Image (tube, helix red, strand yellow):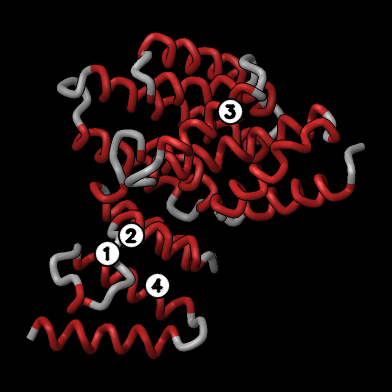
Amino acid sequence: PGDAAPLDSLGRMRCHAALGEWEAVRRLSDKLAGQRAVLAPGEVAELARLGAAAALDMASHATAGNERHWAALGRHAALLPARSFDGAFSRAVLALHGGDWSGAQAYIDAARGVIDAEVTGLVGESYARAYNGMVRLQRLSELEEVLLNATSPTTLPRARLLELWRGRLGHAAADLSAWRELLPVRALAVPPRHDPHGMIAFAQLCSRNGQHTLAFEALRHAEPRAAASWGDAPDMQPDVWLAYTVAMWESGEGGARDDALSRLRGYLRERG
């Protein structure tokens, strides 16, 4: 077994990842980068998997300076076996980002081969056990759609992508984990600022599940100025701004409800 301190950090990474707190995962991943020698092979793989998930989420949502997140994804992917789902999936994303269309498709096919065998075996046991594998298959299908949009945007334009994706998420409307798996892939083709309604729906789901910090973050991805008062940025997207105000009220944190009411009063004054 590894030393207690690195294992403690790895456990904290799992907790932050479960809450969607990717910046905290990234910091712990950086901290553990020089301590891999004391970790068992399975622990190194988990460190790389969690680090890769954080890097992808941050790279796909960042509006500036995201190349460092892509570089981090490359470092983590190198530690994952190419024949594993996470290894093949991460390499597929990197290939797509680098414009290597054939390489991206090859890695998508490799990842699908891994998960197909797993899901086929689990479906015979129970649907619940196979569900996570089915979400992974959907991630691959949507990554393939992102690839098609990149290579032939007239065949699969962004508007059609959004239509397809919104329809699918309607079937997983209450499953926060499925949304969190799929949104970073979708952001590769449709940045959050171009899908405000999708981000609002995700934020509402986060709020219903008590994940208020994640709700605020999602809305700031859609509109970076969402936390500002309306008078400070009257040209921002009103739907996102109002959703942020509702999220403040629902969080009930500190004086958040008073602040939400104050924002609404200011909005009504500005709007006449």
Between disc 4 and disc 3, the foreground one is 3
Q: Which mark is residue 200?
A: 2
Mark positioned earlier in the residue sequence (4 or 3): 3
State yes or no: discs 2 and 3 in contact (Cβ < 8 Å): no
- Amino acid of disc 2: Ile
Q: Earlier in the sequence, mark 1 or mark 3?
A: 3
Check contact, mark 2 vs mark 4: CB within 8 A.
Answer: no
Q: Looking at the rendered structure, which numbered label has been put on residue 240?
A: 1
**Residue in the picture at 61% in, 49% down:** 27
> What is the spatial separation of the Cα atoms under label 1 and label 3, in whole angstroms?
35 Å
Residue identifier under label 3: 75
Marks 4 and 1, how far apart in space? Answer: 10 Å
Q: Amino acid at mark 1?
A: Val
Residue depicted at x 39% and y 29% = 142
Quadrant of residue 204 within the rendered picture: bottom left
Q: Residues within 10 Å of mark 1 (few under 14, many from 20)?
A: many
Mark nearer the N terminus (2 vs 4): 2
Q: Earlier in the sequence, mark 2 or mark 1?
A: 2
Q: Secondary structure at mark 4?
A: helix
State the image coordinates of residue 186 (x, y, percent, origin top left): 36, 38
Callout 4 touching callout 1 (CB < 8 Å): no
Image location of residue 202, percent across then percent down: 40, 56
Residue 19, compared with residue 6, is above or below; it is below
Q: What residue is pinned by disc 4?
A: 247
- Considering the numbered disc 3 on the image, is that residue within a helix, a strand or a loop? helix
Check the picture and name the quadrant holding the C terminus.
bottom left
**Callout 2: helix, strand or loop?**
helix
